[in-house]
Image: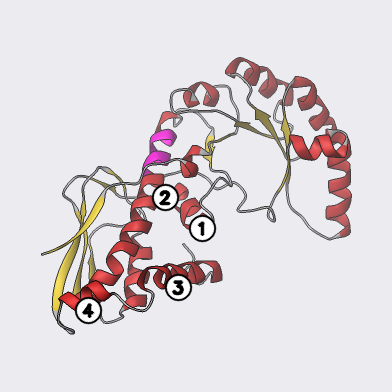
Amino acid sequence: MDFTNPLFIQLIELAIAEDIGDGDHSSIGAIPLGEQGKARLIVKESGVLCGVMVAKYIVNKIDPSLEMKICYKDGDEVGVGDIIFTISGRIHSILQAERLVLNFMQRMSGISTYTKRLVDKISHTSAQLLDTRKTTPGLRLMEKYAVTVGGGVNHRMGLYDMVMLKDNHNDYAGSITSSVERTKAYLKSTNREIKIEVETRNLDEVKEALSAGVDRIMFDNFSPEEMVKAVQLVNKQCETEASGGITESTIQYYAETGVDFISVGALTHSVSSLDLSLKQF
């Protein structure tokens, strides 16, 4: 995680402003100013931990005088009852950081846990698990980082770092060939060196994409049987990717077709958070 990334810094500042506003009136009203205390982050559900240093960044941002003792790191497999870290210092500051820390860490740990589960299902193959752009607006850096912690691989970060010509692009352009040719001309004229991926819906489109010359071909909503034929047709002339409706129960069959990458939007768009709790002790 790049803590110097302006998008990350803005996100944390926005999260703090959104939650605290003009003050934590519950803590201010109930607890004398300056009171000291301790809290610990407890695991309530087994999984793959993610977001520890994000939590430390938030805590330091809210109150640099708070002290953290960290016992586990991102990527560690944790079980019920494990203590991830302890915080000591001003009670007001601990309570201000509590929900922000939990919101980020529970979400990120849920993603890393689910990613690891899917990665394990295809570990006997050479296929790599990819995320997508189906992320929570504003949280993409966090969510894609969590995918890598779980053993997955980031696809493009956004629209700017890789070309993906999907069915709408190709249909609007008139054909895959036209879409690719125009894109290549554009990239050359603007001195951009980024990969081109093309989405295909059938074997005829796979053949057209191969003829057009691209870096990766996506097989969209192919069955595993169709995928075998498509992979054989490509024959390592470019990278291949399976996408569309692939689930935990079917991902193994797709990986065993010999495809290079498998993208699963569910890694980030519908994952359940991992249950964590920050409690006084």
Picture coordinates of residue 54 (x, y %)?
A: 38, 64
User: Which residue is more in the foreground, 142 or 154?
Assistant: 142
Disc with the residue nearer the chain's start (4 vs 3)? 3
| Mark toward the viewer: 1 or 2 | 1
Amino acid type for the residue under numbered disc 2: Val
| Mark toward the viewer: 2 or 4 | 4
Identify the residue at image location x=42%, y=50%.
149
Please identify the residue farthest to the bottom as the structure is shown: 34
Amino acid type for the residue under numbered disc 4: Ile
Q: Please tell me in which quadrant of the rendered image residue 175 appears.
A: top right
Is most of the magenta stretch helix, strand or loop? helix
Q: Which residues are magenta?
A: 113-119
Disc with the residue nearer the chain's start (1 vs 3)? 3
Circle 4 is placed at which residue position?
28
Label 4 – label 3 distance at C-alpha? 21 Å
Circle 3 is placed at which residue position?
13
Circle 2 is placed at which residue position?
149
How many labels were placed on the picture?
A: 4
| Tag 2–tag 4 contact (CB < 8 Å) | no
Q: Position of 112 compared to 89: left or right?
A: right
Picture coordinates of residue 47 (x, y %)?
A: 30, 43
Label 1 – label 4 distance at C-alpha? 33 Å
Q: At numbered mark 3, what does the secondary structure look like: helix, strand or loop?
A: helix
Q: At numbered mark 2, what does the secondary structure look like: helix, strand or loop?
A: helix
Q: Position of 110 compared to 238: left or right?
A: left
Circle 1 is placed at which residue position?
141
Asked if the magenta segment contains residue 145, the reply would be no
Q: At numbered mark 4, what does the secondary structure look like: helix, strand or loop?
A: helix
Amino acid type for the residue under numbered disc 3: Glu
Please identify the residue farthest to the left as the structure is shown: 281
